[in-house]
Image (cartoon, grey):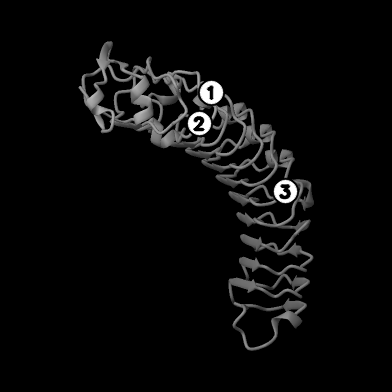
Amino acid sequence: MIQQNEAYNKKMIKKFNIKIAKQRQLEIQWCSELTSLDFVTQTKISEININECCNIVPVVTLKQLMELSIKKCKLERITLVNMQQLLHLDLQNNSLKSIQQINQLKNLVNLTYLDLSGNQIVDISQLRFLSKLVELYLEKNEIADIIALNNLKKLQILHIYENKIVNVRPLKELQNLEYVDLCNNLIIDISTLKGAKFLQNIKLKDNKVINLEIAENVMDAIFNEISDPFYFLDLYPQQDATEEDIRFSKKIDNIYKIYDSARRIKRLRNIMYLEQQRVIKYCLNQQQLQTHHQIVFTNKIINLLSQFRDEECYLK
């Protein structure tokens, strides 16, 4: 590994030429004048990690390479030649504006992990060719259209927060999706997520979701492993949820507590919860309890008494 505490002046290093290397991993950090990496076919390296080498002009040709990480290098483009064995590609925190600037990306047909977070990417249409992707990180870009994702049938983990997404309908096709982080977007409706039968965790904070009615086949524990919708959906705080009721499927029988931290929601009078008689723990702030004195619970009206307004309310 070449890093900052080496005795020689790394800033003078411009080129490595590794002809016969027994090592499997190469790590390079803070070599600001490094401009090229040349490898011959005899190399045994299978993993390369490059960090903060700001002048590198990467044209990577290494058939055996399985993992490549080039982070914080101000990359505006990269060419990947004969890299069909690559499984893991990490190009986070660079200056990529388009996936087309990753030349030959669509040829990485065995790729299972891709991190393009912290760039300036708008168009992700080329991702439709990467059908073996399992983990995908696209957060902190300029993405609005995610239709290319509907071809990623094996995708299990998706981070795409801090973008400009409105429509999540393409995610309906991702039936193996287990985790999705959609925070800080422009999303209004999440009902199309019902196709993700293995979904365990959805994060939706800081969107524009105003209809919080969750479809039964999204939230029903028969179809997925969600046990605490408010926690796993991470719906709060919903800044624009000021007019809609919150409803949950009557079929859900494994919710054991709900933390209501959506401070701006004004109406809670039609909340539907369990069919069975069981204890539900509400953590309602004082402002809400002053204006909402009744909650529908198992088809009965429960009066929230004033003495509970500053405390946790246990309703039976």
Q: Residue at x 33, y 25 (%)?
A: 289
Quarter assignment of residue 245 = top left
Earlier sequence position, callout 2 versus callout 3: 3
The kind of residue tagged 1 is Ile
Residue at the disc numbered 1 = 210
The percent coordinates of residue 192 (x first, y second) are 55, 23
Residue lying at 76% horizontally and 48% vertically, measured from the top left: 97
Residue shown at the point (69%, 51%) measured from the top left: 119
Quarter of the C terminus within the rendering = top left
- Cα distance in 3D space between marks 2 and 3: 26 Å
The percent coordinates of residue 114 (x first, y second) are 62, 50
Q: Secondary structure at mark 2?
A: loop
Q: Position of residue 305 (x, y in %)?
A: 24, 21
| Label 3 vs 1, first from the N-terminus | 3
The Cα–Cα distance between marks 2 and 1, rounded to whole angstroms, is 8 Å
Q: Amino acid at mark 2?
A: Gln
Rounded to the nearest whole Å, what is the CA distance between mark 3 and mark 1? 29 Å
Of 292 and 207, which appears nearest the observer? Answer: 292
